[in-house]
Image: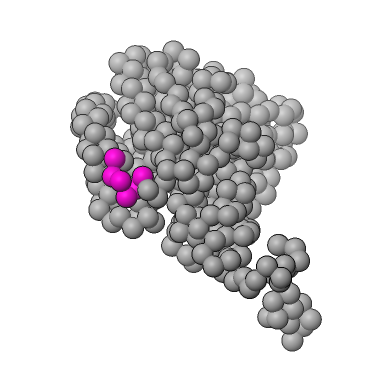
Amino acid sequence: MSQDANARLTGDFYTAPFGPRIEEEGDTLILNMGPQHPATHGVLRVIVELDGEYIRRAEPVLGYIHRMHEKMGEVKSWVQYLPNMGRVDYLHALAWNWAYVGAVEKLMGLAVPPRAEYIRVITCELNRINSHLLWWGAYLLDLGAFTPIVYAFADRERIMDLLQMVTGSRLTYCYYRFGGVSADLGDEFIRGTHEFVADFRKRLPMYRGLVTDNMILRGRCEEIGVLSPETARRYGATGPVLRGSGVAYDVRRAEPYSVYDRLDFTVPTGRNGDAMDRYEVRMEEMNQCLRIIEQALEALPDGAHIAPDLPERFLPPKGEVYFAVEGARGKIGVYLLSDGGPTPYRVKLRAPGFSNLSLFAELAQGTLLADAVSILGSLDLVIPEIDR
C-alpha cells in the first residue's frame, strides 16, 4: 500500500481540507454526504466535520462528473458545439442554448428576426418554470414531503409536451440556432401555451396553501442559512440566491438582451436572506414568467423564425466576445475567443451554480446537519453545470 493511500486510511487525509484538528475541544466525526447522497441531486460530495449534530466545517468536493465541456468547444465546429449546451444544465437547457448562440451572433454581427426573439423569450420562460418546478418538488422531498413533487411533475409534463412540439425534445433542448430558432411556433403550441398559463396561474395559490404556508416547512426554512448581501457578492452569487438576500440583480433587467426591455415584469427579492426567502423568490418568479409569456404571445410578430441568407459555414472573425443571460440559477456567461478558424480557439462558461455552491461552506458552519440539507437545497444546485 502506498504512503498516500495509508494516510487516507489512518485519517490524516481529513487534515487537508480542514487544517489541524483541535482535539482539546472534544471528539468530532467526519461524515461524507455523497457522492451518492440523495440530497445532493448529483454526484456531489460534501465532507462535514460534526461536533454532535452541529457542523464545525464543511467542504464541497467536485470532480465526480467532470465532462470537459470547455475543452470540447475547442475541437468541435461552431455548429457542432450547440448540443453541448443542453447538457451543461439539463434543467434550463434553453438558457444555455441562448447564451452560446447569443455570443456567436454578437461575434459575427448577426441580426435575429423579431419573431425569433419573441419565440426565444416564450420558450426560455417556459423552461424556467419547468426548472423551478423540479427544484420545488425535489427540495420538499429532501425535507420529507413526498406529495408536492407529484404535483410538480404533473405541471412539468404539460410544459414538456409544449416544448416537444417545437424542439423535438423533452429535456436536453437544442432549439436555438445562430440567427433564430430551428422551427416556427404552430397554432397548437400557441393555444396550448395560453391554456397552460391560465391553468398554472390557478395552481400557484394551491401550492401556497399546500406547502408555502405550512408551519413545518417554515420551521425548516425560516432563519436557516441566512446569507447577507455582502457575503453573496463576495462569492459572486447570482439568481434567486442573490435576490433572496434583497439584491434586485437580474440580467434581463440589469443587462437587457433580446426584447426583455420591452416587457413588463417584476424582479422579486427577499428581506432576510434565509432559505425561506430564496424559496419565496422562486415561487414568485414563476408568476412573473407567466406575465412575460403572456406579453410575448400577445406581441408575437409575423415574419421569419430564422435569419435569411445565413452562411453555409460559420467562420466568425478573429476576436473575443462575452454574452450573458439570466438562467434559472443565475447569471450564465459564455466567453468565446476566435482565431478565425472553423472551431473556437477558447470557450469559457460561467456557471452560476459554482459561485452559489462556494458559499455553502460558510452558511453551513455552526448549523445542525439537518439544516445543512435545507441550505443545500435552497441553493438549487445542478451538479453537471457546476462540474462542467
**Whole-percent x, y for residue 26 in the image:** 65, 71
**Residue appearing at x 45%, y 59% in the figure:** 370
In terms of depth relative to the viewer, which is nearer, 370 or 109?
370
Locate residue 14 relative to residue 326 in the image: left or right.
Answer: right
Residue furthest bottom in the image? 1
Report whether residue 14 is seen. Answer: yes
Residue 262 figure quarter: top left
Image mark count = 0
Q: Is residue 373 magenta?
A: no
In terms of depth relative to the viewer, which is nearer, 178 or 311?
178
**Whole-percent x, y for residue 374 in the image:** 45, 52
**Whole-percent x, y for residue 73 in the image:** 64, 44
**Whole-percent x, y for residue 83 in the image:** 51, 44
- Which secondary structure class fits the magenta region best? helix
Residues rendered magenta in the picture: 213-218
In terms of depth relative to the viewer, which is nearer, 113 or 327?
327
**Residue appearing at x 34%, y 48% in the figure:** 217
Report whether residue 98 is seen. Answer: no
In terms of depth relative to the viewer, which is nearer, 338 or 69?
69
Residue furthest right in the image? 3
Residue 338 figure quarter: top right
Locate residue 33 relative to residue 9 in the image: left or right.
Answer: left
**Quarter the N terminus occupies:** bottom right
**Residue appearing at x 70%, y 81% in the figure:** 10
Q: Is residue 216 magenta?
A: yes
Residue 5 figure quarter: bottom right
Task: Describe the colour scheme in one phrase.
Answer: one colour
Q: Is residue 306 above or below residue 344?
A: above
